[in-house]
């Protein structure tokens, strides 16, 4: 009887340990492994993009580097298409999403988000033939206009919501969407304000016009699996810490005030 009791107790302890290991969050797992794996689509200037050496750089990339340093681990990027970010997280291909992802109600049903690290909004880039014809997003809501956006983004959702009467087409990358407008095959491109602002500074896009006033409100945040509250707690405290110690402002100025980094990607 005693032997059976201790056997049952041992089995219970083993089961408890297995449950605790299964419930280990992204941060705990990264510390255990020594590597923080982050899923990203490195095509969102200036948040995450590849330089001439193929390295992922950008504002969000620097935030994640600082986060990894604070954890005492190495940062490992897992590049995927934007539409594969949430499926990849749910399939445990990486620990978290760091890819300029906007917090939406639909996405929040599938994963948890950290506190926002920046607020952006959608803006519009126009072909120069629309000068004097289009002054707001409402003006583009007509069947004669061809509107480009990027697959799986809130820009694509905004296009459906605000200019649903127009001819909508979504492209795999923002760069391709802009090229379509530059070439005249599309009339306008909808995307996040910081990206569009940087795109206008590139010589090949200098003729484009911009509706610079954002017409949506979009907080960007890091995405984690549902129920990973310990990791969310740690990340939110990290974001608060770097906001207080000047790290956030320094990195923000590096990517949004200075333009020296443009030479690294062109």
Image (cartoon, rainbow, N blue to C red):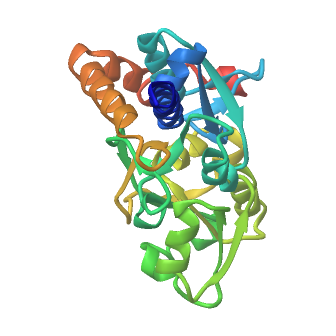
Question: Which residue: 67% across, 62% down?
Answer: 151
In depth, the one of 59 and 200 nearer the eye is: 59
**Residue 96 at x, y percent in the picture:** 54, 37
**Residue 105 at x, y percent in the picture:** 40, 65
Question: Which residue: 30% across, 33% down?
Answer: 233
In the figure, residue 249 lies in which quadrant?
A: top left
**171 shown above or below 29:** below
Q: Is residue 255 visible?
A: no
Relative horizontal placement of residue 101, taking residue 227 as reference (left or right): right
Work out which quarter of the rendered image holds the C terminus and state it: top right
Q: Is residue 146 visible?
A: yes
Relative horizontal placement of residue 236, taking residue 52 as reference (left or right): left
**Residue 265 at x, y percent in the picture:** 70, 26
Question: Which residue: 37% across, 41% down?
Answer: 114
**185 shown above or below 245:** below
**Residue 205 at x, y percent in the picture:** 67, 48
Question: Which residue: 71% across, 21% down?
Answer: 55
**166 shown above or below 63:** below
Q: Residue furthest left?
A: 244
In depth, the one of 67 and 168 nearer the eye is: 67
């Amino acid at each position: 009887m005693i032997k059976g009791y201790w056997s049952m107790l041992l089995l219970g302890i083993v089961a408890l340990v297995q449950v605790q290991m299964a419930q280990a969050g992204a941060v705990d797992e990264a510390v255990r492994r020594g590597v923080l794996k982050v899923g990203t689509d490195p095509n969102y200037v200036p948040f995450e993009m590849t330089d001439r050496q193929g390295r992922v750089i950008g504002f969000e990339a620097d935030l994640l580097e600082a986060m990894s340093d604070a954890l005492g681990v190495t940062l490992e990027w897992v590049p995927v298409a934007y539409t594969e970010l949430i499926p990849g997280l749910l399939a445990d291909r990486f620990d978290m999403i760091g890819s300029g992802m906007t917090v939406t109600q639909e996405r929040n049903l599938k994963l948890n988000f950290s506190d926002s690290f920046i607020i952006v909004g959608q803006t519009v880039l126009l072909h120069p033939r629309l000068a004097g014809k289009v002054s707001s997003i409402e003006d583009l809501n007509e069947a004669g206009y061809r509107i480009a956006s990027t697959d799986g983004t809130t820009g694509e959702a905004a296009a459906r919501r605000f200019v649903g009467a127009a001819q909508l087409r979504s492209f795999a990358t923002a760069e391709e969407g802009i090229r379509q407008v530059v070439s005249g095959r599309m009339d306008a491109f909808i995307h996040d304000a910081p990206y569009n602002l940087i795109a206008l500074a590139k010589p090949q896009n200098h003729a484009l016009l911009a509706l610079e006033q954002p017409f949506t409100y979009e907080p960007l945040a890091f995405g984690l699996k549902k129920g990973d509250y310990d990791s969310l707690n740690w990340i939110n405290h990290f974001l608060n810490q770097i906001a207080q110690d000047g790290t956030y402002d320094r990195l923000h100025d590096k990517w949004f005030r200075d333009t020296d980094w443009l030479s690294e990607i062109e």
